[in-house]
Image (tube, helix red, strand yellow):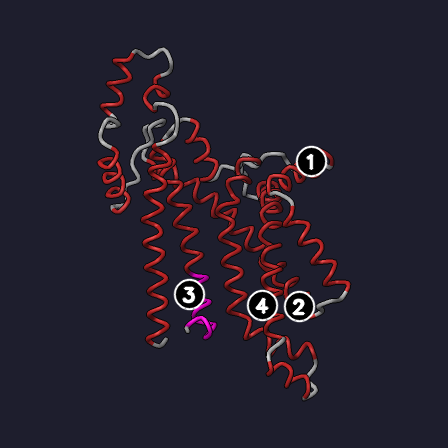
Amino acid sequence: MDQQVAYLVLSRIGVAIVTLIVVSFVVFAATEMLPGDVAQILLGQAATPEAVAGLRQSMKLDDPAFVRFLRWMLGLLSGDLGRSYANNIAVADLVGGRLLNTLKLALVTTVVAVPIALLLGITTAMYRGSAYDRTVNMLVVGVISVPEFMIATLAVLVFAVWLRWLPAVSFATDLSSLWGIVRAFAMPVITQSCVISAQMIRMTRAAVIDTLKTPYVEMALLKGASWNHIVLHHALPNAVGPIINAVALSLSYLLGGVIIVETVFNYPGIAKLMVDAVSTRDLPLIQSCAMIFCLGYLTLITIADIVAIVSNPRLRK
């Protein structure tokens, strides 16, 4: 890695850190603007004003906003996510198991979606303009046009209501058998795979087509090399960078789309935990879940940028 590449990589990492700090301001401000009084919600409508005021004082909710923000940031930097208002349990204990469930769902989705998307993206680029290419493109555009919650609803309608093969909700409790894993992950994975695969297919196809237009590919064709040989030995190795970039960008969408999927299927992941925390105004839990999502998203985007810089000399100029 030369000095210029190292500088660009460090610049991207610096931008990611600054973005994370800005996001922390936005997350804290957004949770502060949530309607309703946390102490009043926890004690109920029958609570006396004295009881509400006492609880607010014990929870340090009367402190100025910037003091609470600094306390929260210092806690994050030291690995302390705070305590849940609603459960009086350490947020780290609440988030740990749910985050693991979300990561399991993301892993299964990645294992299913990435190979299918790469295969379709590469083959449609190889047979560009054919009936196969047009059919796949038409299906991809159709999937992209359908909202994620609609795909989830259709999956419930088909597999749970009409066919009765799978449960309408996914509790992810019985993972001791293959059938248990299928019942837990099938519909959430189908929903997320449809969304990220469509994006990945289009980006992979574009990357391979760009590579096939290069002069060295034309030279290989003039020398009589077969089309499959050109794609496998000349085009794909040079398109690896853009393809990895496309995969990382598509996977980053998993972190945003998982909120809809976990809510629709009642999947016990961190997104469902955050949605439940909003209803109880559990601010430390909401803030921690939001920051975890932002950190994961920024990590994937930064990796995609670094891969693009290292693999594409034109981006270094």
Query: Where does label 3 land, which residue?
Result: 306
Instruction: Classify mark 1: residues with Cα within 10 Å, few (<14), some (14-19) or many (20+).
Output: some
Magenta-drawn stretch, dominant element (helix, strand or loop) = helix
- The quadrant of the picture occupied by the N terminus is bottom left
Of circles 4 and 1, the one toward us is 4
Label 2 neighbourhood size at 10 Å, few (<14), some (14-19), many (20+)? many
Amino acid type, mark 1: Leu
Dot 4 crowding, Cα within 10 Å, few <14, some 14–19, many 20+: many
Q: CA distance from mark 4 to mark 3?
A: 17 Å
At 36% from the left and 46% from the top, the residue drawn is 23
Name which of mark 2 and mark 4 comes first in the sequence. 2
- State which mark lies toward you, 2 or 1: 2
Magenta residues (range): 303-316
Marks 3, 1: nearer the viewer? 3
Residue highlighted by disc 1? 157
**Nearer-N-terminus badge (4/3):** 4
Q: Amino acid at mark 3?
A: Ile
The Cα–Cα distance between marks 2 and 4, rounded to whole angstroms, is: 9 Å
Which image quarter is the C terminus in? bottom left
Residue occupied by mark 4? 207
Give the alpha-carbon distance from disc 4 to disc 1, as whole Å.
Answer: 36 Å
Q: Earlier in the sequence, mark 3 or mark 2?
A: 2
Task: Classify mark 4: helix, strand or loop.
Answer: helix
Q: N-terminal of the two: label 4 or label 1?
A: 1
Residue, disc 2: 125
